Amino acid sequence: MKTVYIAMSTDILHEGHINVINEGAKYGEVIIGLLSDKAIAEYKRMPLLSFEERKLIFENIKNVTKVVKQDSLDYTDTLQQLKPDYVVHGDDWKEGVQQETRAKVIETLKEWGGQLIEVPYTHGVSASEIENKVRKLYSTPDRRRAALKKMINAKPFIRVLEADNGLTGLIDETTFVIDPKTGFRKEFDAMWVSSLCDSTFKGKPDIELVDQTSRMNTINEIMDVTTKPIILDGDTGGKVEHFVFNVKTLERMGVSAIIIEDKTGLKQNSLFGTEVKQVQEDPDVFADKIRRGKLAQVTKDFMIIARCESLIAGQGIEDALFRCRKYVAAGADGIMIHSKEKDGQEIFAFMAEFRKEFPFVPIILVPTSYNQFTEEELCEKGANVIIHANHLVRSAFPAMKKTAESILLHGRSKEASDEYCMSIKDIITLIPKE
């Protein structure tokens, strides 16, 4: 009997997908090439269900004979292994980002006389709209918490943007662009709840003055209107006895990770560098805090990430490596290495040495000082998570100040409204009603 190959990535099936499968079954036994999480992550958000869950669904669909894993958007290797008589696909890939993939499929099929059959696209069905609705239902604490670790394992790097309240959370959640090079959608993968930005929006200094209850309220405001995973800036983590309770609370809320820094005493922002006194904690004491935090957590998904301040404090790469070895041994799920040097060279040197010993431990960067490097360049050097940590608050303040100055200068708000403000209609329709 002839064989039919149909590639699928979705975990939200609608009549269009079923129609393609049923059409394929008219020509022979249907083999579903199910895209892996890694392959899907190359061009859109991570699927809601794991590969094994999606595989089980497709295996139980009528007219599906077999399900195999397709590890790339490129069909070539899988097709050359299976040599199907037919490939069936919706005709919507004749235009847009999949044109090149389509052309390669046709060329590959020629090697053994295979044929491409294209099924008319099912109009009136939007997979993205269905996914957006379902994703909100799936944003439970367990699923949100697990999402970050899942993405780190599947994607080359994780792109993170600061979120300070519900509004900036919505910006993180909904902002996207179409990459002109690939034609794929680009968006932020996760949100960073920064102590600096949280303090700034409250008009407070960044010295761990904002208490944990207030910070938890901020997280809840963000979670109310978003679905993406959250990484919390935990400063020093506080007293170890308090830290273990905060870990349990954050885990229960659905936060994916907390990053704590190995400093002690009154907090001084790291970007001051050695201009102010930066006192690092004893590495064994800090490692014990990580160890006790890991023992306190209930699930395997929550991450405690150690932020090493050796480069900030002027202690050098060897001290950073010495400390990070202890932190990883204590159970740290990743290392954030920080620097205020603009050329990025000490960060790159650290990553090169760290990767020799720990090839699979995630490295987190906050490239505020060395932002001339692209995310792809930082990834090539060894970074797994790249956090754009404070750019929304830094851009919001000058815009709001200009608006206030314009009103004072002109004695009215017309000029400010015309030049700096979105319309009232846009602002009142910004938040969609459920």
Image: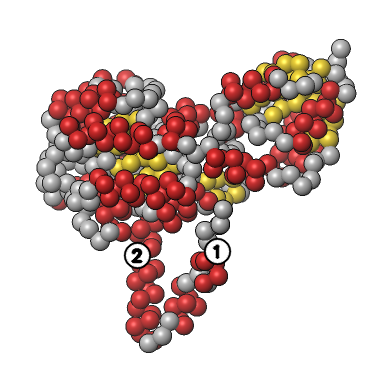
Q: Name the residue located 44 percent from the left edge and 32 percent from the top edge.
A: 142
Q: In this view, does 394 lie above or below 141?
A: below
Neighbourhood count class around disc 2 (C-alpha, 10 Å): few under 14, some 14–19, many 20 upward:
few
Q: Can residue 314 be seen in this view?
A: no
- Residue found at the far front of this picture: 434
Looking at the image, residue 419 lies above or below residue 153: below
Q: As rendered, which of 167 and 312 lies closer to the eye?
A: 167
Specify the farthest residue to the top. 1
Distance of mark 1 from mark 2, alpha carbons?
23 Å
Q: Is residue 214 left or right of residue 118?
A: left
Q: Do the residues labelled 1 and 2 touch (CB within 8 Å)?
A: no
Which residue: 39% across, 68% down?
Answer: 399
Relative side of 201 to 177, left or right: left
* Residue underneath mark 1: 429
Q: Residue at x 12, y 30 (%)?
A: 282
Instruction: Residue 87: tell me if it is visible.
Output: yes
**Rendered image quadrant of residue 373:** top left
Quarter holding the N terminus is top right
* The disc label shown at residue 397, or none: 2
Which residue type does callout 2 highlight? Phe
Disc sitting over residue 343 in the figure: none
Q: State which quadrant residue 167 falls in.
A: bottom left
